[in-house]
Image (cartoon, helix red, strand yellow):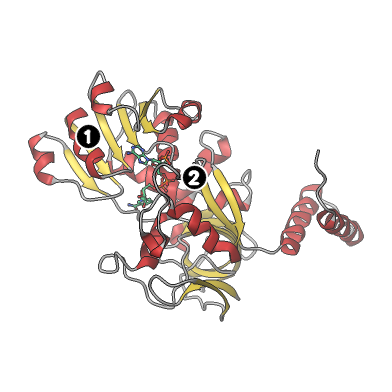
Amino acid sequence: MKAVRLLEYGGQLVFDEIPKPAIARDEILVKIKSTAVNHVDLVKASGTARQVLPIDLPWIPGHEFSGVVEEIGSDVAAYAPGDAVFGATSGMGAYAEYAAVKAAVIAKKPSNLSFEEAASVPVAAQTAWHGILTHGHLEKGQTILIHGGAGAVGAYAVQLASHVAATVIATASRDDEAYLNSIGASQVIDYREAQFEKVLRDKVDVVFDLVGGDTQKRSFLVLKEGGYLISAIQPVSQEEAAKHRVTGAMMRLAPSGDVLARIARLLEEGTIRPDVATVYPLQDAAQAWKDIAGNLPGVHGMSPSGRGEARRRSHGKIVLRVASGEHEIRTRAHELYLARGAQSGRELEDWLQAERELMAEPRRAD
Ligand SMILES: NC(=O)c1ccc[n+]([C@@H]2O[C@H](COP(=O)([O-])OP(=O)(O)OC[C@H]3O[C@@H](n4cnc5c(N)ncnc54)[C@H](OP(=O)(O)O)[C@@H]3O)[C@@H](O)[C@H]2O)c1
């Protein structure tokens, strides 16, 4: 199979031909359609955090995916070959044509999402779910402050908090204000212009920290006694938490098929929605990493753009499309074929040919 691999810490990503993974009894072999880029991919590859986030080299990055079940282990009952699924792997390995994943961490792909959209969901949405609901105990009628609300995780946190009828305040760049209002934030504080602790009139029940550093420190000032400060990015000072009589904790995502299935239902109902910024072919993973590195000073040997010249990245996830064009055409044709209940093989072949011709035509400017 084709896979993107890292051969040494801080090295280049290479597009290689390697053997397909074998599956254990409780695993599923997924033919991957799309995967998505996460900060942790770059951090692990850089080696800067190898004490806490070690990897075995050569290493295939990729923490989340959408795809189709190819083969199931003998202990797997919940899935069958041909099922469209998505999930976050407990290890890595999704920048590849196939991955072996535990059945317990995946769910059926929401039927209304493309494979590209579905691949963008598992890490960000589950991190948000666990951050604000499991660890933050957010309830109806409470107020939450989400730092980094327009980011991949933050946008799900805003939507989920709004879904449980909490009041949502987010810190973000001014350009993202309208977007955040459209997904449920009632107040957006521009972190470049204002200090949130000076702007907020009332204290909040929960702070979800996706920024860290000084932002995390200042968050104690805006929390009610008995509140929760949950960070997905760095440990929370227990001394400060005790001093302010709040609970402070850093969370790390533990993927769960049950939670993901609940997220899938919310996506299908249209209660929450995914946000894909850019799609690259898998072999252009290095370019995708350059895009995201601008937000992450010094990771993976890439120099960050200077603050003033930094290219403004729109919100949303960067997705890598794994399947080839021909594969996609066949899948779409097959879906159409099933949806129409068509019987004729001829009709499907004609449709395939028409699609191929359409894709081969140069795109006209409107
Ligand atoms: N613990 C876990 O299990 C876990 C899981 C997933 C992610 N994470 C971590 O969570 C963090 C967020 O991930 P993500 O995927 O959501 O990142 P992302 O998509 O890059 O979003 C980061 C957001 O933070 C905003 N931001 C930057 N500085 C800010 C500040 N001082 N105040 C308010 N907002 C600020 C950025 O806005 P601008 O672009 O406008 O500056 C951007 O919208 C990352 O550090 C990631 O590694 C942890």
**Residue 129: x %, y % from top left:** 38, 43
**Which quadrant of the frame does ligand 1 lie within?**
top left
Q: Nearer the viewer, residue 344 or 284?
A: 284
Residue ranking furthest to the bottom? 19
**Residue 147: x %, y % from top left:** 33, 37
Quarter occupied by the N terminus: bottom right
Tag 2 residue: 311
What is the number of the mark on residue 204?
none
Tag 1 residue: 219
| Looking at the image, residue 313 lies above or below residue 297 | above
Question: Is any atom of residue 36 visible in this view?
Answer: no
Q: How many marks?
A: 2
Instruction: Tell me the element at label 1.
Output: helix
> Quick check: 130 left or right of 77?
left
**What's the distance in space between the residues labelled 1 and 2, CA to CA?**
28 Å
Q: Is mark 1 within 8 Å of ligand 1?
A: no
